[in-house]
């Protein structure tokens, strides 16, 4: 069983994140750059991708909670100043050399964006459910990142913006792909993405971007950990399978998803977890499930 501790769990290390296990089988990843409003630069997204890939296959954890340090912002998005220094997006070739021709520079930019996308998409690819607790300013990359999570909670003071058009670009890390599949109104998605206008927690709840609004950050984090702990108490075969099948259903036809579900469960139904759950119900006790 995973240790319940305020110390960094064994096998995990991070420069830009605080890693803890607040309850059994739950890993908390806290963005930790509050003096910069948790704005991201390249080492941060590379580190996040590595952490999510690690916990995805770690049998000691069954749910992940993603939070951010400080009171002002979950993240203010991309650290534009840092991104322009020593990057292919700035002048030259990103390595101190001269600016390459347009085709070669475009290839470098494409590879850079793809790497960035892959690191953030690691949150969605994670086999374990990911619950995010949003607070304060949630700008640009905050929407990209939280759109990859399975469940989103936020505070009453949370303020959101798909901000990219205000810095002269179209959002390219996932918001324009995922947000239309999360909320019920494509008109609303275009309204906020085209204008970069702010929307608050009440509006985020109304359109379905978040599923709970809590009074403050402490309560939002507490609720996220409590929910993650609930998921961690259930069969990891059932929970991870449910995440996989829901994501497949989102991206495929009903017929294809039904076929995939049948193929998935023809092996997963043979697990011992079903027997353990039924027996625990008969004996009126909480079931204990093996690691996955």
Image (cartoon, rainbow, N blue to C red):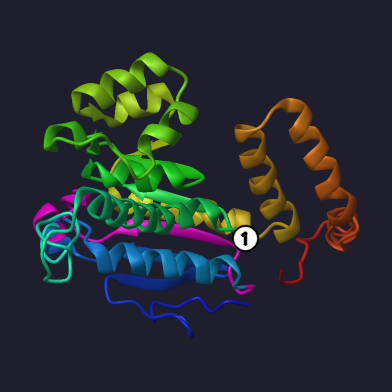
In the image: residue 114, left or right of residue 217: right
In the image: residue 159, left or right of residue 27: left
Q: Quadrant of residue 120?
A: bottom left
Q: Which residue is mark 1?
A: 232
Residue beneath the point at 20% across and 36% down: 169
* Residue 23 appears in the rendering: no
Residue beneath the point at 16% across and 50% down: 72
Q: Position of residue 127 (x, y in %)?
A: 60, 58
Crowding around mark 1 (Cα neighbors within 10 Å: few <14, some 14 to 19, many 20+) is many
* Residue 285 appears in the rendering: yes
In the image: residue 11, left or right of residue 86: right
Q: Position of residue 147 (x, y in %)?
A: 42, 41
| Magenta region | 59-83
Verify whether residue 27 appears in magenta: no
- Secondary element under disc 1, as helix, strand or loop, is helix
Verify whether residue 77 appears in magenta: yes
User: Can you say which quadrant of the picture contains the C terminus?
Assistant: bottom right
In the image: residue 231, left or right of residue 148: right
Residue beneath the point at 39% across and 45% down: 146
Q: Position of residue 255 (x, y in %)?
A: 78, 27
Q: Quadrant of residue 210?
A: top left
Q: In front: 287, or 162? A: 162
Q: Quadrant of residue 203?
A: top left
- In the figure, 179 relative to 229: above or below? above
Q: Position of residue 283 (x, y in %)?
A: 88, 59
């Amino acid at each position: 069983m995973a240790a319940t501790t305020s110390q960094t769990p064994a096998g995990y290390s991070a420069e830009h994140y605080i890693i803890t296990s607040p309850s059994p089988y739950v890993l908390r990843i806290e963005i930790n750059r509050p003096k910069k409003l948790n704005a991201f630069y390249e080492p941060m997204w590379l580190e996040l991708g590595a952490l999510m890939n690690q916990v995805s296959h770690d049998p000691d954890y069954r749910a992940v909670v993603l939070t951010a340090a400080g009171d002002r912002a979950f993240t203010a998005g991309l650290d534009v100043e840092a991104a322009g220094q020593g990057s292919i997006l700035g002048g030259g070739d990103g390595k101190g050399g001269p600016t390459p021709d347009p085709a070669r520079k475009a290839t470098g930019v494409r590879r850079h964006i793809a790497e960035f996308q892959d690191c953030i998409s690691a949150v969605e690819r994670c086999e374990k459910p990911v619950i995010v607790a949003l607070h304060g300013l949630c700008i640009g990359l905050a929407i990209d990142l939280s759109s990859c999570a399975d469940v989103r909670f936020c505070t009453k003071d949370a303020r959101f913006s798909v901000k990219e058009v205000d810095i002269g670009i179209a959002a390219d890390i996932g918001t324009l792909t995922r947000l239309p599949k999360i909320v019920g109104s494509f008109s609303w998605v275009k309204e906020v993405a085209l204008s970069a206008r702010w929307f608050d927690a009440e509006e985020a709840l109304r359109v379905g971007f978040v599923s709970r609004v809590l009074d403050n950050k402490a309560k939002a984090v507490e609720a996220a950990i409590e929910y993650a702990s609930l998921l961690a108490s259930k069969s990891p075969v059932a929970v991870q399978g449910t995440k996989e099948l829901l994501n497949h259903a989102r991206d495929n036809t009903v017929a294809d998803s039904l076929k995939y579900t049948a193929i998935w469960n023809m092996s997963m139904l043979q697990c011992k977890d079903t027997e353990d759950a039924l027996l625990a119900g008969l004996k009126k006790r909480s079931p204990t499930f093996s690691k996955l």
